[in-house]
Image (spheres, helix red, strand yellow):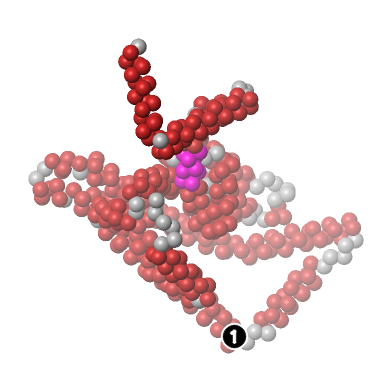
Amino acid sequence: MKKLFTLKNVLICILFTIFLLFVKDNFSVVWNAICMLASILTPFVIGFLFAYILNFPYKFFYSKVFGFLKNKKAFFAKMRKPLSIICTYTAVIAVLGFLIAILVPQIGDNISSLVERVPSYFNSVYEWLSSVAEWANKTYNANIDIDASFAQLGKEIAKNLNGTTIANFSKNVLFDTLLPMITNTTAGIYNFIMGIVISVYFLSAKEMLCRQVKRLAVAFIPIKFLPKVYEIVDITDTKCGRFLVGDIIDAAFIGVLTFITMSIFQLPYAALIAVLIGVTNIIPFFGPFIGAIPSAFILLLIDPIYMIFLESPWDMIIFIAIVFVIQQLDGNLFKPKIIGSQVGLSSFWVLFSVIVGGSLFGMVGFILGTPIYAVIYTLIGKRVKNAIDNKGKIAQEALDFEVLNYVKIATEQKKIREEKENAQKEKLLKFIKPDKHTNSESDDDNKDDKE
């Protein structure tokens, strides 16, 4: 057994403590360095995500479409990978271009229509509040003056605007709002384009990169830990990666289905609402609600607000029925076929993972909380199963409360402890008196021979 307090271990502990103290005293500097490193690596992270998602259609082209080139001449065999990559990106760009050509013009028309309706919405709100105030004044003598209230609100807004100089207003708008927005937008476009370029290199060199990562793992991770590391990587790929890819495909399918169904029923804002439903459907559990509630509110605003209580808002009612039916089909038919049983979590643990992930990491936690928790849940479940199996039959009986027998369990545990103690005593006797123990064993053998 290795000694714990060696000079090397003590020096490592001292250096690690000094490093922690340095981080504590210079946390802002360390955090800025981490943010700078993260911004530099952002294109590579985006490229890795693109490559990981596109790896599924790439494998289809590589193994199914161009699989026959494997047994051909060397030149044709080498063309198998570039042809697969070209077809993968061509297919994805074609699908995205088709969706953009159909949806973007309609989304633009929907947004412009909503903007044009804003004054009518305010007028509807004003008329509805006036009717409510008139009813309250007649019924309860409330003496509510809506015109005076709106006039006072206008005065407060004008007062706040007058208190702000043009220079300060320009500074706040240009330097505090527009400039960061332009900078972030430019950086986002740059990272997106570079991510696409880097994803091509990831796909073309994925075998070499996997070999290099394996070599690093074998070189620096103890051999006894390698099976556990490989198991974690395999479960993460199954639970997290494939779930994420399947969830994106399912969300896109639900968005297209919502658009087609709303178009059949001639509901307004079909493209805008379908995109909203599809994007939010990536979030487990809460996604359908997050997309459906604002969409229903948009449809509710089509009719004047003061008319809502006089006649039924049929567009909103039809939309809610469509969303309900589609979500039932998605939860019971589409999603199990697309994703399968990759998650393996009950609805309670899905809710738990979404809430905790969203609270800790925001939107990323909402999306990745469930598959990451599924990985942790699976690893803990395997560890628990192995621990129960190691305890033997009595542990399996203890899990069944109908045959639970505390006396039997106590007796069995006592027997197991006695067997372990006797085995330890035998080992100790062999170590203390090996000659005597050997002679006794030889005498026992002679007796057995005579018999």
- Identify residue for label 1: 168
Where residue 350 sits, quadrant-wise, is: top right
> Front-most of 355 and 66?
355
Q: Residue at x 33, y 49 (%)?
A: 223
- Whether residue 380 appears in magenta in the rendering, the answer is yes
Whether residue 328 is visible here, answered yes or no, is yes
Q: Residue at x 14, y 47 (%)?
A: 77
Q: What stretch is highlighted in magenta?
A: 375-385
Which is the main secondary structure of the residues drawn in magenta? helix
> Front-most of 117 and 33?
33
Amino acid found under the numbered disc labelled 1? Asn
Q: Which residue is drawn at 49% across and 57% down?
A: 364
Residue 182 percent across, percent down from the top left? 45, 74
Whether residue 234 is visible here, answered yes or no, is no
* Left or right: 134, with 196 as reference point: right
In this view, the residue farthest toward the top is: 451
Residue 313 percent across, percent down from the top left? 65, 47
Where residue 406 sits, quadrant-wise, is: top right
In this view, the residue farthest toward the right is: 141
Q: Residue at x 28, y 43 (%)?
A: 60
